[in-house]
Amino acid sequence: MMNDVSDAVVHRSVKRCIAALAGCAFAALALSAHAADAVLTVVVAGHTDTYTLESLQNHAEATTITIPRDVSYRREMTYRAVPAAALLRGLPPDATVRFTASDGFAATLPGAPLLAGGEGARAYLAIEPPDAPWPPLRATDTATAGPFYLVWVRPERGRIVPEEWPYKVARMEQVASLPKRFPAIAPASTVAPDSGVNRGFSVFLRNCIVCHTINLGGDGTIGPDLNVPYNITEYLRADALRRLIRDPQSQRVWPASRMPAFDASILSDRDYNDLLAYLRHMTNRKVSVPVPK
């Protein structure tokens, strides 16, 4: 009787293992099929190029790079990648490029760092191989940073912040700067250019507007608007807001949350104080919220 019970338990365990392995294999195959069908659209100076994953893997300037400390994976990663400059030929250095991800993330980056070569920070578009998917970004799902991911070699030499590493990139497009496209996000014209408010505006553009809008302006669709109908400084105490920015999970436990922690290595105390000055300034510059019909 005991042996029969033990055999049954072992049999069930083996079946579970086989089912789990089959599930993992199916997920990997599904991911590979999805990656193999991936398309990247690049728009520069009104000209549109479309790249498949295969064409990028075989690009004349494709190379292998190693990132000692990848921002998204937090460990060393090796990629097949194409220099961003090779995909953005014809882009003026003073232009800006919007990277739109398939998950709603949108980062608008200055053109000069993307075009730079030499021994400074250098941007590459990493390409996920369909037959060897990258690791999942989180333990709770199978999503990776692929199929296309903007990565940086020597990012510390260009003060590249984590929000300037967009992944799941679907489109790279030359666009006007954010303040030109969304004038309502800018501080009042009477504010001194070297003031904390304007410095905070720059901090906001680099770190926050990729996910959030302000005064309904911006490309990101992941997070809420930070000024209408109420500014975030109006409904969060100063200490709670600081903790939220420094360590989001310490303020609200939400498994689906994607807001990263902005510690002092990313956002200095001065940057944080300037950002707060900008946000408080915007409380008096609210736009009207459209009434749903």
Image (tube, grey):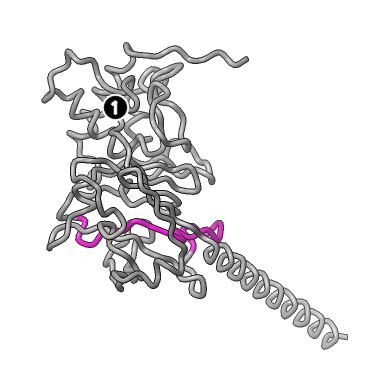
Q: Rate crowding at label 1 as few (under 14), some (14 to 19) or many (20 or more) other CA atoms within 10 Å.
A: few
Q: Residue furthest front?
A: 47
Q: Residue 151: say if magenta.
A: yes
**Residue 238 pos. (x, y %):** 32, 24
| 38 sits left or right of 87 in the view | right
Q: Report which quarter residue 46 is drawn in.
A: top left
Give residue 141's position: percent from left, percent from top: 56, 57
What amino acid type should be assigned to the residue bearing mark 1?
Lys
Viewer-nearest residue: 133 or 23: 133
Seen at 25% across and 19% down, the residue is 187
What is the span of residues highlighted in magenta in the rendered image?
A: 136-155
Can you say which quadrant of the picture contains the N terminus? bottom right
> Which image quadrant is residue 31 in?
bottom right
Q: Is residue 243 magenta?
A: no
Residue at left 66%, top 69%? 23
How would you classify the magenta stretch by its main secondary structure? loop
